[in-house]
Image: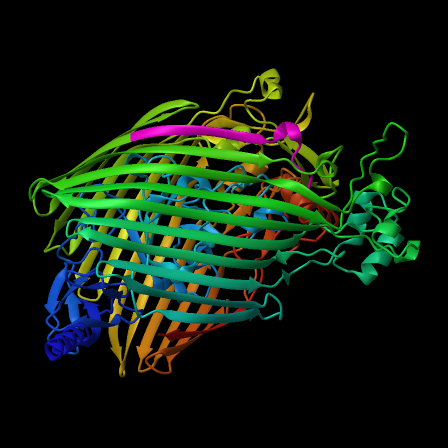
Amino acid sequence: MKKFAFLLFLLNVSFLFAQKEVSGVVKDNTGNPLPGVNIVEKGTQNGVSTDMDGAYKIKVKEGATLVFSYVGFSKLEKAATDAVINVVLSEEGGQNLDEVVVTGTRTAPRSNTTSALPIDVLSSKDLTSTGQASFDKALQYKIPSFNTVQTPVNDATSLLDPYEIRNMGPSRTLILINGKRKNLSSLLYVQTSPGRGETGADISAIPTDAIERVEILRDGASAQYGSDAIAGVMNIILKKNTNGGSVTVRSGMTSEGDGEMLGVSMNNGATVGEKGFVNYTVDFSKVNLSNRPGTVDAAGEAGDFGASLSDVQAFLAKKPDAGNINGSPETAAAKFLVNGGFSLSDETLLYYNAAYVYKKVNSFANYRTPYWRTLADYPFLKDFFGNGTPASYQGYVPTFTGDLNDYNATLGYKSTKNDWNTDASITVGGNTQTYSVDNSFNRSDIQDADGNNVYLENSPINFKPGGTSFNHVVGNLDISKVLSDKISIGFGSEIRTETFEVTEGDKASWDGIGADSFAGNRPENSGKWNRYNLGAYFDLAYDVTEDFLINGTVRYEDYSDFGDATVWKLSSRYKFLDDKITLRGSVSTGFRAPTLHQIYTQKSQYSFVPGQGIQVSGIINNVSPQARQLGIDRLDAEKSTNITIGIGAKPMKNFNFTIDYYNIKVEDRIVLGDKVNTQFGTVAWFENSFDSRTSGLDVVANYNNIELGTGKLGFNLSGNITFQNERISPVKSNNFGQTLESLMFTSRPDTKWILGANYEIGKFGFSLNNTYFGKTTFDQDGLNANLKTEFIPKVVTDLGVTFSATDKLTLALNVNNLLNVLPEWKFKAENAAGTAILADPAQVKNQSNLITFNQRYSQMTYDGYHFSQLGTMFNLSLNYKF
């Protein structure tokens, strides 16, 4: 009996360990490797994803069957009879909703070539090949209609840079993670820079190594996804592989020797039992300060601050840049993300994902020179910022530190029963930012009951100005079914609750005029506000023929704080010439609810005023007593109409292109206006100010697999051309000037093109990308009305080289901005009076001083620019696969 039991034990052990390793490469029918393809051992959750070269390796039981699936490609099953199984996937079919998220439809998913809408799909390889340190900057050099750039000194904006698609502002692109809405940031951009008056999700917080692919829908989609989708939708799909993980070490610096970067990230996965999987990413990074100050003009300084020219010149002889720090701030970040699921049965799946990001940014305000904050006015500054003697006082520079915490998590349940697909989920997310100001003081002349100064010589030099937070809880129920080979339906609902909070700063940070450089949140401006909304949609897709598709969606939303909205979308696609050409188009209505930030923000802020240095002004909200006294209306939702018409073609095996025209009209556009003198001081406010129209053309073309020697060469060209981006109605009030008009409509490139070439040979890979940034124009605050500034078009060249030293080790070198191209601007005359100004060097110098803060920001002006001012950057990474 014991021998029998022992034999049975050995049989069980041999059965458990009777595994074989299968490897191979997955390609599409044009011969290109497919990264991110899911390979699963049928009937289990044991799976992997292909790497950047389409390669995979998996251990399976004897007699197993492998299931290969990828978005837009037919699912394929292969018996694991051989040690090497190479697979070619075709684009002839779709996939079930429980296998993949596809952006742009609420019914059965379709491939990009059969979709009625323009969708960009970027793989993880596409993102990492840019060599950029963060996800948002990688998109800048991959998607022509996507723009973002670091702004000059703008306080909390240093925590995350404003981004936008199709020049529509960060508020009008909806961000999804695995198809679920990501939370907004708690930051409202209030300074004079692109994105002013808006907020967006912090996409820079998402670790690039956790991303399997990104699907960007370049079309209005409010009817499908709700508010914020006027310009489009970005759906970030997370990795699901359970083995084949890797660790990446990144380092780099600028050609000036600053901005040193060091990062390490790990992505890995594992099976959980027989039917579960988990994939996780850990990412740590540190980027040091980069500084690009200008040489300050002494005469301009003397005029602005009422100082003697000799005093200014004496200081600038020691500090030609006036001590100003202008560039990219010091940033440290820790990012954690997990994505997983568990099959409860063959027809049900429990899934989850969660992410947490901590980011710390150290930046600087404008340097307070000794002729700006003088000992004559503040004699105690020699003790605060010197060693007690007048000669030791050389001014001071307030520091600004921001701590950001961002999190999101989704728990969901999918099931398929009688061909009905059901997806129920709950998503939570939040973003908190807290600030610190050091090396400053409160210069308010306030006395206590005994007549002693509360601040001035008794002021602290460190402050806690408070912060902001935003969170939401979202419940989704989505149901779909393919009723026949012609009709698919989808319907569902969403309930969302949002909370926005402004945290009060310590009293010294806000009392009087508050901390010098960044005043804290006052008690009367602090608080917590909440709202909820309910939404429901119905989607119908009708394949009239195999080639002719019609898709329609209608959505109803009801908000607790401003009312309801009903929007719709109709799209269509027709294929002909054996699917070589596809005509597509859509027309839709949309809406964007005012954010809680826009409704309730009320604060004091420090801003640069040309010719006057830094001044304090304020923002009043639309529900305040001050707003009622000024007759300011409450905010309502923006409404939009989107039209898209496009063509896609694949005339030959290795060549394809798409061209899409878009036209977006936004009514009642929400704007943070100019500062206006009122009985409450110099203040600005939000309002539904005017209507706008944005139109343009997106072009994408690819030509791959050109045999050159023993390697293969590929080309890609993509571009965005703006035809119209302007206000088309009168403004509601007089608080919208030319500066805001240019920030909103001309501060991003009027055209942007990316031409890339890739060559793979042996163990080496080479990429060369040229990004053309078209002109941008500004009418900066303080600039003579007869002039404008124009940023000259430039081409930024990026070079990448990869070397696969072994099957597990890959080295990559990226040289971004290889030719050290820098932003460059010039004055343009609007008329004869402007021409006369440009003919006078003294007037030209004066105008230049006004918009650059006396040359502190000579390279980009105070209000922004069209690409990075940091010049050439070197990045080296090492990737080791487990």
Residue 433 relative to residue 415: left or right: right
Residue 520 belongs to magenta span: yes
Instruction: Identify which residue is drawn at 33% across, 44% down.
Output: 180
Tag count: 0
Residue 334 relative to residue 41: left or right: right
Instruction: Identify which residue is drawn at 70% across, 53% down.
Output: 855
Residue 82 relative to residue 639: left or right: left
Give the answer, above or below, for where 806 lies relative to 250: below
Q: Nearer the viewer, residue 669 or 527?
A: 527
Question: Can you tell which quarter of the image residue 520 is in?
Answer: top right
Could you say where residue 127 lies in the image, as x and y percent from the top left?
39, 62
Could you say where residue 512 lies in the image, as x and y percent from the top left?
76, 32
Residue 661 relative to residue 293: left or right: left
Give the answer, above or below, for where 320 lies relative to 815: above
Could you say where residue 834 lies in the image, as x and y percent from the top left?
64, 42
Residue 634 in view, yes or no: yes
Picture quarter with the C terminus? bottom left
Write the start and end of the magenta stretch as one range. Answer: 518-535
Question: Can you tell which quarter of the image residue 265 is in?
Answer: bottom left
